[in-house]
Amino acid sequence: MSKKTIVWFRQDLRVADNPALNEAAERGDVLPILIVDETDQDMALRGTARAVWLHHSLLALDKKLGGHLQVFAGDPEQILLAVAAENGADAVFWNRCYTPHRIIADKQIKQFLSERDLAARSFNGSLLWEPWQVLKKDKTPYKVFTPFYKKGCLSAQAPRATVAAPSDISFVGEASDQSMIDGLELLPRHDWAAKMMADWQPGEQGAREAWAQFADNGLMGYKNGRNFPAKANVSRLSPHLAFGEISPHQIWAALEHQPQNEDVAHFRSELAWREFSAYLLYHFPTLPFENFNSKFDQMPWQIDQTALEKWQRGQTGIPIVDAGMRELWQTGYMHNRVRMIVASFLTKNLGVDWREGAKWFEHCLVDADYANNRASWQWVAGSGADAAPYFRVFNPVLQAEKFDPLGAYIRTFVPEIAELPNKFLGKPFEAPAQVLADAGLELGIAYPHPIVDLKQSRNRALAAYQTMRGQD
Ligand code: FAD
C-alpha cells in the first residue's frame, strides 16, 4: 500500500520548487494542508492586509492542487495528529520557517509527532543559505551586511538547485470545495480590500508573471531606477516572496539567464538583504522587539498618539510622507525609498518608537515579513545591525526633489495638491500665497500644514541622540 504524507503548507504556497511537496510525492500519496495558527505570536493575522492576500493565495494554491488543499484553524499539533489518524498518514513534511515562535513550535511539534510514530521532516524552501551555515571564522554570526554577503554567503556553498513541480501527484482522498477556505474567514466583512487587491495577482502564477514583467521591463536600470518610486524598476515580488509563491532559489536561478551586469548584481544583493534579515532574526531572536543596539534603550521616545495617527493616515502635511502612507493604505505596498523616508520621519522628526511604525506596517503591508520589517525599522531608526547612523535624518523635502523630481508619485497619492508646480510639490508650506491660490489650494483646509517643523524636529532628534550617547 502506498505511503501517505501530510504536506503542511505555511510560507511556501507553491507547487514548483517546493522540496517538502516533492519528497512527499515521491514517497507516495500526498495530503496537502494549511493551518491558520491563532497562537502564532510573531505577527497577528486577523484583520490585516496579509489575511486578505492569504485568502486569495490559498484559492490559487488549491486550484493548483486540483482542489485537494484542506485548511484548518487551530492548534497545529492537534490538527496534524487528527488529520494523520483520520487518513492513515504516517509522515508530516514541511518547509522551514525561521521566525522565533515558529522555530520553537516546530521543534515541539517534531518531537510530539515522532513520539506518536509519525515521521516529521522539514526542508529548506525559503532561504538561499541556512542561517546556521553562514558564520564568521570564529563561528559567531555576522552583524554587518557586506561581509555577511560577500565573505559569508558568496563563498559558502551555492544555493541548492531548484526542483520542478512533481509531474503527477497522487492525492489522499477526494477533492474538497472552496468553502473550506471561505470558512477561515480571512476576508473582511466590509470589503475594504477590493481596491487594494486590484493590481495584485496572489498565487504562483501571479508571482511568475510579476517576475517575467520585471525581468523584461524593470531589471535593466534596476540599480539606479529602484530609488525612484514613480519608475517601474522594482519587481513588486515582495508579497509573493513573503507567502512563498515564488522561492528565492527560482529567482536566483533565473538571474543566471540574464546578462550579468551591475543591475543583476544589485538585484542579487537586495535578495541577500532579505537573507540578512532572516539571518539576524534567527541568531538574535529578540530583534523584533528589543533594540539591537542596547544604547537605544535610553532613547527618550515621544508618546504622541495624535502625531502617530496623522502619520498613519497620511495627513502629516509633508507630501512625500503622506504619499507613502497613502500608497501603503490603498495598495498594501510601499516603495522601498519611501519606506525609508516615512520611517525616518516617524522615528526622528516625530520621535516615535520604531516599534509603533513596525506594527502599523505589519497591519497594512501585503508583504509584511517579520524579519525584513523589524530589521528594516531598526536599520532606519539607527538601533539596528549595520544600521544607518542615527544622525542621518532624511530630509523628506530634498528626498522628494531628488527621487520624485516630476512629482508623479506625489500627484498619484496626494491628488489634492496636484495642481502645484513641481517646485513646491514637496513643500507646499513654502509656496507663496499666489502659487497656492493658482493651484486652488488652501493649506489647513484641503491639505494640512506640516505637523512638525522639519528643521526644529531634526535638531530635537539630534539632541535626544546626544543625550542618549552621553549616558554611555
Ligand atoms: P525589489 O527592489 O524588487 O527587491 C526584490 C526583493 O528583494 C524584495 O521583494 C525583497 O524580498 C528583497 N529586498 C529588497 N530590498 C530589501 C531590503 N531593503 N531589505 C530586505 N529585503 C529586501 N520588505 C519585506 O519584504 N517585508 C516587509 O515587511 C518590509 N518592511 C520594511 C520596512 C521598512 C521600514 C523598510 C525601510 C523596508 C522594509 N522592507 C520590507 C524592505 C523593502 O522595502 C521591500 O522588500 C521592498 O520594497 C519590496 O519591494 P520589491 O519586491 O518591489 O523590491
Image (cartoon, helix red, strand yellow):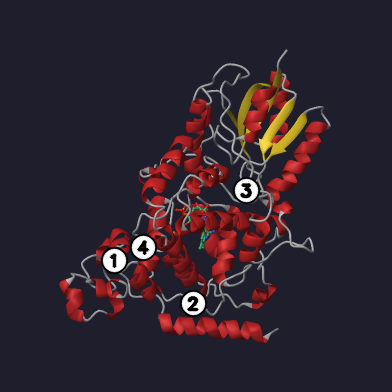
Label 4 and label 2: CA atoms lie apart by 19 Å
The residue located at (52%, 45%) in the rendering is 251
Q: Do the residues bearing badges 1 and 3 touch, measured as CB atoms within 8 Å?
A: no
Q: Residues within 10 Å of mark 4 (few under 14, many from 20)?
A: many
Q: Which of the two discs, 4 and 3, sits closer to the camera?
A: 3
Q: Which of the two discs, 4 and 1, sits closer to the camera?
A: 1
Q: Is 349 placed above or below 117 here?
A: below
Label 2 and label 1: CA atoms lie apart by 22 Å
Kindly identify which numbered label has been placed on residue 393.
2
Q: Residues within 10 Å of mark 2 (few under 14, many from 20)?
A: many
Q: Do the residues bearing badges 2 and 1 touch, measured as CB atoms within 8 Å?
A: no
Label 4 and label 1: CA atoms lie apart by 10 Å
Kindly identify which numbered label has been placed on residue 407.
1
Q: Which of the two discs, 2 and 3, sits closer to the camera?
A: 3
Q: Residue 302 is drawn in which quadrant?
A: bottom right
Q: Amino acid at mark 2?
A: Val
Label 4 and label 3: CA atoms lie apart by 34 Å
Q: Residue 120 is drawn in which quadrant?
A: top right
Circle nearer the N terminus (2, 3): 3
On whether ligand 1 comes within 8 Å of the CB at mark 3, the answer is no
| Quadrant placement of the C terminus | bottom right
